[in-house]
Amino acid sequence: MNYKETLYFIAKCLTISLEDKNRELVEKQLKSNSVDWDAVVKLSTSNYVFPALYCNLKRVGFLHYLPQDLISSMEYITNLNEDRNKKIINQAKELNYLLLENNINPIFLKGTANLLAGIYQNIAERMVGDIDFILSKEDYTKAIDILREFGYSEVEKYKYYRPEEIHYRRLQKDNNIAAIEIHKAFMDIKKYNKEFSYNSVEKDIQSISGFSVLSNSDKLKLTIISNQINDNGFCYKSIPLRNAYDVFLLSKKTNAKVAVNELKNLSHPLNCFLAACYEVFNKVDSLEYKVNTETRSYLKIFNKQFFKVKATKNKHKLIRIYLFFKIRLKIIFRSIIYKEYSIWVFKRLTDFSWYKKKLINFKNSIFK
């Protein structure tokens, strides 16, 4: 199996609990003994969907097609992830109670919000990193002070810190499983933040078991935004399966096509991601997208990457270089405009240990 065959196989497997046509196709391939399980494990783990793959195969009774040692490994990892997610949910409950007691209403985001909202048939499916939540501008600083008093402190401790942009620096508390990210915005691009912000989503938030989470439509938008905008997925024309799987599940709860086209400036990158999901998940009805010249062009490049692997790697290197210098120019611009940035930049430029660290990171990023 080449990369594309492996990606599409895993993607179809992630839908077999809900899509009969994909269940039949997957079973047919499993019966043919044509699956390269080493490739499947490597790609599903790098895309953080290994437990979700196991849960879907188990739900439809397909595990007997897998090698026994693989089943044991998948079960072990999934159980570990389930235990972790239970602890994350308990930590979220503690955070929620603490902030509500201080008249602050956190809106939980991303993986933690999806766990709290129950979009997965099994909480073990989702691999979660940090606990993310967004607050109003009025509550933002107050919440940070409260959490510090409660025992939260920086994950990475420095003598000075970069001025926060969309979220405060990551905080952690002893004996807690996850770090937290306190957001005041969803993106660091003003034209996008005007149409998708705390104020725009607040009116539609859901209350589930005492937790505030985004509406299903806004959850779907943010899932795509996290990749396409914040992680520069739109530049790379990539499709991380963890984000794609969340979009698939959310498309069963809201009209995905309508959701992504409700926005003006963001509709193009979001619609393109939805188009890629439609292709990879084998034309699932709930993932239908707005077909236009832009999406056709996007899919053409997206599909070409699978056949021109070497050219794609070289292109991605150039994109990484471009993004590296783009970010640095933005920092220089902000240091001219904002005092806190100029102070931070001065401290960085006089810190020789920082030069050494960044040089190593730059080489790893460009030449990996």
Image (cartoon, rainbow, N blue to C red):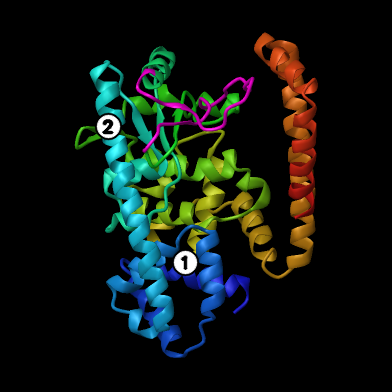
Q: Which amino acid does the dot numbered 2 rest on?
A: Glu
Q: Is residue 317 above or below residue 347?
A: below
- Label placed on residue 11: 1
Residue 174 falls within the magenta-colored stretch:
yes
Would you name the residue on which mark 2 appears? Answer: 94
Going from the N terminus, do you reach mark 1 or mark 2 first? 1
Residue placed most toward the observer, 110 or 277? 110
* Segment tinted magenta in the rendering: 149-175
Q: Residue at x 38, y 24 (%)?
A: 151
Magenta-highlighted stretch: main secondary structure? loop
In the displayed structure, would residue 190 be above or below residue 316?
above
Residue 268 visible to an observer of this rendering: yes
Where is the N terminus found, in terms of image quarters? bottom right
Outermost top residue = 339
> Please, what is the three-letter code of the amino acid marked with disc 1?
Ala
Q: Position of residue 330 (x, y in %)?
A: 73, 25
User: Residue 114 occupies which quadrant of the picture?
Assistant: top left
The span from disc 1 to disc 2 (Cα, nearest Å) is 35 Å
Q: Position of residue 98 (x, y in %)?
A: 27, 24
Q: Secondary structure at mark 1?
A: helix
Picture layout, residue 311 above or below residue 341: below
